[in-house]
Amino acid sequence: MEFLTGVKQPDTLEIKELLAEDLAGGTVKVNGAIHAINDMGSVVFVILRKRDGLLQCVYEEKKANEEMKNLKEASTVEVEGVLAKDDRAPHGIELRIQNVTVLSEPASAMPLPISKWKMKTSLDAKLNYRSVSLRNIRERAKFKIQEGIVRGFRDFLYQQGFTEIHTPKIGARSAEGGANLFRLDYFHHPAVLQQSPQLYKQMMVGVFDRVFETGPVFRAEKHNTKRHLNEYTSLDFEMGYIESFEDIMAMETGFLQYTLELLKKEYADELRILNVTLPDASKIPAVPFAQAKELVAQKYNRKIRNPFDLEPEEEALIGRYFKEEYDADFVFVTHYPSKKRPFYAMDDPEDGRYTMSFDLLYHGLEITTGGQRIHDYVQLREKIAARGMTEEGLEQYLETFEHGMPPHGGLGIGLERLTMKLIGEDNIRETTLFPRDLSRLEP
Amino acid sequence: MEFLTGVKQPDTLEIKELLAEDLAGGTVKVNGAIHAINDMGSVVFVILRKRDGLLQCVYEEKKANEEMKNLKEASTVEVEGVLAKDDRAPHGIELRIQNVTVLSEPASAMPLPISKWKMKTSLDAKLNYRSVSLRNIRERAKFKIQEGIVRGFRDFLYQQGFTEIHTPKIGARSAEGGANLFRLDYFHHPAVLQQSPQLYKQMMVGVFDRVFETGPVFRAEKHNTKRHLNEYTSLDFEMGYIESFEDIMAMETGFLQYTLELLKKEYADELRILNVTLPDASKIPAVPFAQAKELVAQKYNRKIRNPFDLEPEEEALIGRYFKEEYDADFVFVTHYPSKKRPFYAMDDPEDGRYTMSFDLLYHGLEITTGGQRIHDYVQLREKIAARGMTEEGLEQYLETFEHGMPPHGGLGIGLERLTMKLIGEDNIRETTLFPRDLSRLEP
């Protein structure tokens, strides 16, 4: 009988391992995809793409055997050679090839110049050839940064006593109802895809006090903009026993601080590749909605057209205002109008036209919506009735409150949007692995 | 201007903090939900449910004020009192109540006896009152264990150089097609919910070498069994530059070993609450499909009806065989018949009727399916053609291979099933937060 006893240590090395100790002069084995071949006449440079970077390999034309001569871009190979230091090579190391084994070969030439530093390829072409375009080092780095954000979110919240949950994406109804729901047939019952895990995460506050989820949400919105997707990854948390919605903003500030440190520490290569300047989250101003509108109206000579709504240009100006006046990259806008918030939002006891809620703007773009929720059963049913909504489909949600719930609140962060702003892109599709929009259902 | 500067430290303490240093004799503040009230006449015990356990609070009837007398189960409260050691109380501590503030009150009495150690409530009732039934300490503990499994999966794979990805759940087609797809209208285009991230994770192997995803998958299967869900959480990984599919089994063995250690270390309370005996993953036997069938046919006097399929009872017997003969909790069954595996599975070069694939059985139940995939473009297209399949909708998937892919393979693990087996439940709904099955779309 054969037995598996754990991870097999491969005899090939990663770049991190090549750099970890002084292996110069020794023979090592690596594998990778051939990213580029630069034939200089007397010597040939073969650039390997490995998961942690590029590795320069080199052989002399005259010493080449058949296998070396037949190498082509996009083949995957195993290379044996002598490691040498070379300041001109990536990471300051170079592999002098002794032996090559070809593991696989492409059937056709590359459709995109992925080995260029900047591809100068249209977004559409990049998305059409997604599994090829992401082989470019800069394109790939964006999604390592995205990984870092999700890791930061989870690790920080674990430390803060949150429990991770997995809530269903198919349901009988969703948090906010309305027109932007994808509908499907569920064994002859009408069903929808969840717009948000909102109702579920609230239901779990009574169980775990603090919960979070990182998962897909679905919005059948019919506008095609640079900032919207019809499916995206939402970073959600919900916490009980809060004193006010400031506790939630404080928790988000802590998450940002933690994550920026994590990126600096563990994603330094990718930050450098993308030339990212990280924002400052040490001190985030908070300004009430109505006051924010007035501040930008005054400073930028803008008329307030609708005191209960914030236009995208106004958001951008609030971002500009706080950058100019406070050198702030982020700003919390608080106390959103009640009519713009869902039924479960807690109204301000001092002025019922507003809610105990907030958005977080990052350089003038909303990346988070959050706030305190109603936790009292009677108050919650009154608000549902006052809005002319039905309780149908909310039975189990309401039962949660009927049987006691602590004061609580939470937020949702759009992962792709936060990634986009962090690396300075201006189209959310640049930071989405496989975007879904009005015209894109493939790949 | 107000500023947020990071997480606010609450003035209330969690159980872990109460135990961390010697606070006995001091005054502390805590919050929580009233899990039970035991009125003993002269003294009243108020059991608080906190996120990290139960805390016994106590007051003397004669010293009680109005607020104390009005406490009821399922209220949430803030309690101030003197911490005392008491070996009879949970965690060996007790809080002598000086002051109580009620934060919220329930509107109705509990529909389920959640404060009992074992609720003895039907599964249906537990699922109908999900947000209430999970307040039971044992019910809740199951999902902490589940969290530990997901954490273990991610942390282990990060360490092994994997990149986390987020692939779309709505698509034009899915990995395996067929009848078990949920279908929906996507802005007047026919779309499906993904059965698995299979095609996407393979496409990303050419970019990141090693990728993983933890997310929902959807299967419109029309059978209602104790082991199936129509939506579940899949732990998926895919890795490049493998020498054989054994590398994948070795990686899974490593994941199990890592995760069992994590559970022992960080989820000891929940393991104790649920009385779980962890399985042994130090050494997992691997047996070819055909041989496994013969072994159980011989030992248990069973006739082999279909040499190319494994019946559930046969799976259970294989589990029993390896427990009896090798004291093994897990067994890899390898070389599944080609006709039972999807088109992308790599056939065994020595016998094309079988594939370089495996299932992992845990006490006789399949919890993982995995294997090596075809990485050669020509071979892949030939197999698609041989199966009479169309390439329609597979264009971008195939392009990935056209432009070079390393030898690779991967696996998918059903999270709820693994949790079920680990804690010794026999219905997967017991370890699913909000199950979706033929008859259950709510809550």
Image: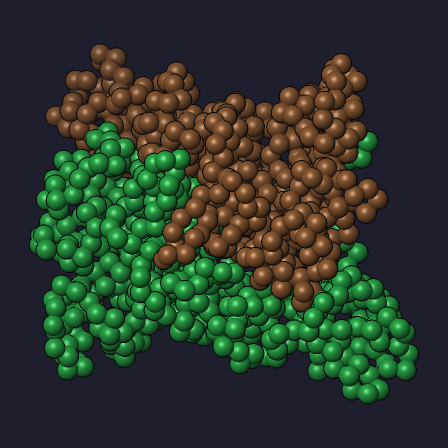
Chain colours: A green, B brown
Quarter of the image where one finds residue B240: bottom right
Q: Is residue A440 above or below residue B224?
A: below
How far across and how far down the image is residue A23, in percent?
Answer: 79, 67
* Location of residue B37 with respect to B212 vertically, above or below: above
Residue B285: x, y in percent? 75, 32
Quarter of the image for the C terminus of chain B: give it. top left
Residue drawn where x is 60% and y is 75% of the image: A112
Give residue B261's position: percent from left, percent from top.
Answer: 61, 37
Question: In the displayed image of the protein, which residue is found farthest to the bottom?
Answer: A41
Q: Residue furthest top?
A: B41
From the viewer's perspective, tell me whether residue B396 is left or right of residue A177: right
> In the drawing, does residue A436 fall left or right of residue B248?
left
- Spot occupied by residue A325 in the image (x, y as percentages of width and height): 25, 78
In the displayed structure, A90 sits above or below A238; it is below
Q: Inspect this view and state whether residue A126 appears.
A: yes
Q: Quadrant of the N terminus of chain B?
A: bottom left
**At 84% from the left edge and 67% from the top edge, which residue is drawn?**
A100
What is the tally of numbered marks visible in this picture? 0
**Residue in front for this viewpoint, B343 or A308:** B343
Q: In this orientation, does residue A21 appear?
A: no
* Residue A283, picture quadrant: bottom left
Q: Residue at 69%, 30% (x, y): give it.
A: B309
Residue drawn at (56%, 78%) of the image: A119
